[in-house]
Amino acid sequence: MTIREATLQAAAQLRETAGDTPLLDATLLLAEVLEVSREQLIAAYPEEISPEAWNAFRRLVDERSRGVPVAYLLGRKEFYGLEFAVSREVLVPRPDSELIVEVALELIARIGPAARLHDCCTGSGCIAVAVAWAVPQAQVSASDLSTAALRIAQHNAERHTPGRIRFQRSDYLQDIGGSFDVITANPPYLTPAEIEVLASGEPREALYGGADGLAAYRRLIPEAVDKLSVNGYLVLEGGREQHAEIAALLREAGFAEVSCHRDLGGAPRVTVGRLG
Ligand SMILES: C[S@@+](CC[C@H](N)C(=O)[O-])C[C@H]1O[C@@H](n2cnc3c(N)ncnc32)[C@H](O)[C@@H]1O
């Protein structure tokens, strides 16, 4: 069997079972097995695949067919142009979450480059690391409840922004001291039904937002009031249906200038409030 035939056969299987990008997934997995780039894989299409490589590839494709994200199978995911290590203990960073980074960078441009930013619910650390990487003078810290996630986040921070980010374990913002100009968070916000549909094998603690998906915001928003400086900003990712409720919770807690930012698909994704 040639490399081309192996790729197409796997893509046909994945088209039936998993995800929207079967050919891309098959290509990435076979390139990983053969330890070549995607371009090198395509150039090698006419070559025969060895039985060992075929068996290793089949195992990965079967796992992908069962819904395991490609990022877990590769152990990495690109976010904001940087490569992040991921394991099954952290959420796979989503392209939609790059919007939080964009919004935080716009706010830092207004506040000044030495702005103090805390990323709550940091997971793989993708948001904190991307901000610290983009603004070398920013003072960045990050927290998560999961010590396993914090280990991965620290590893990613050491790779891209060595010595720049302070990490701490905390139940939301409960144990975080100090005062910040910006707090970012992409907290768990899925309902039980949404988690069942997703079936990605990602940690439930990273996804489950209570019966209506809003439990994290009810905790985080009032806690942020005590941790933000006057005129500080809270920047929250949420589900596409959740903007109105998150905005109402922000106003109730005393935030002003509440605004909504849309993702590339046009869905409301990030809600921002300024502490008046
Ligand atoms: C949706 S994931 C976001 C991860 C990362 N920020 C991203 O955007 O890819 C939510 C994160 O919140 C963390 N988390 C869940 N409950 C928490 C709590 N009570 N306090 C702090 N972090 C919590 C999870 O461990 C997980 O890493």
Image: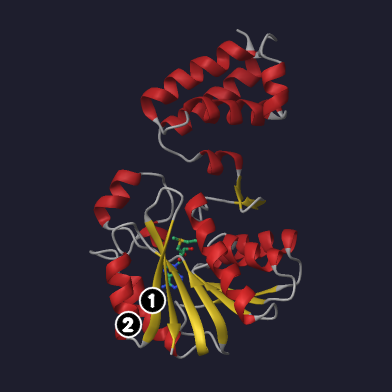
Above or below for 249 versus 21? below
What's the distance in space between the residues labelled 2 and 1, CA to CA?
7 Å
Above or below for 207 versus 5? below
Q: Position of residue 74 (x, y in %)?
A: 60, 40
Q: Position of residue 88 (x, y in %)?
A: 51, 50
Residue 258 badge: 1
* Mark 1 neighbour class, 10 Å CA radius: few under 14, some 14 to 19, many 20 or more: some
Q: Give the left or right position of residue 19, taking residue 37 as reference.
A: left
Q: Are marks 2 and 1 in contact (CB under 8 Å)?
A: yes
Residue type pointed to by label 2: Arg
**Corner quadrant of residue 210:** bottom left
Write the residue at 28% across / 59% down: 241
Write the residue at 52% across / 53% down: 93
Q: How many marks?
A: 2
**Corner quadrant of residue 56:** top right
Write the residue at 57% across / 11% down: 5
Asked whether the viewer can see residue 141, the reply is no
Does any atom of ligand 1 lie closer than 8 Å to the CB of label 1? no
Q: Position of residue 209 (x, y in %)?
A: 32, 64
Asked whether the viewer can see residue 15, the reply is yes
Which residue bears the numbered disc 2? 251
Question: Considering depth in this image, is 3 or 147 the residue closer to the camera?
Answer: 3
Does any atom of ligand 1 lie closer than 8 Å to the CB of label 2? no
Q: Position of residue 47 (x, y in %)?
A: 70, 10
Question: Considering depth in this image, is 161 or 251 the residue closer to the camera?
Answer: 251
Residue type pointed to by label 1: Val
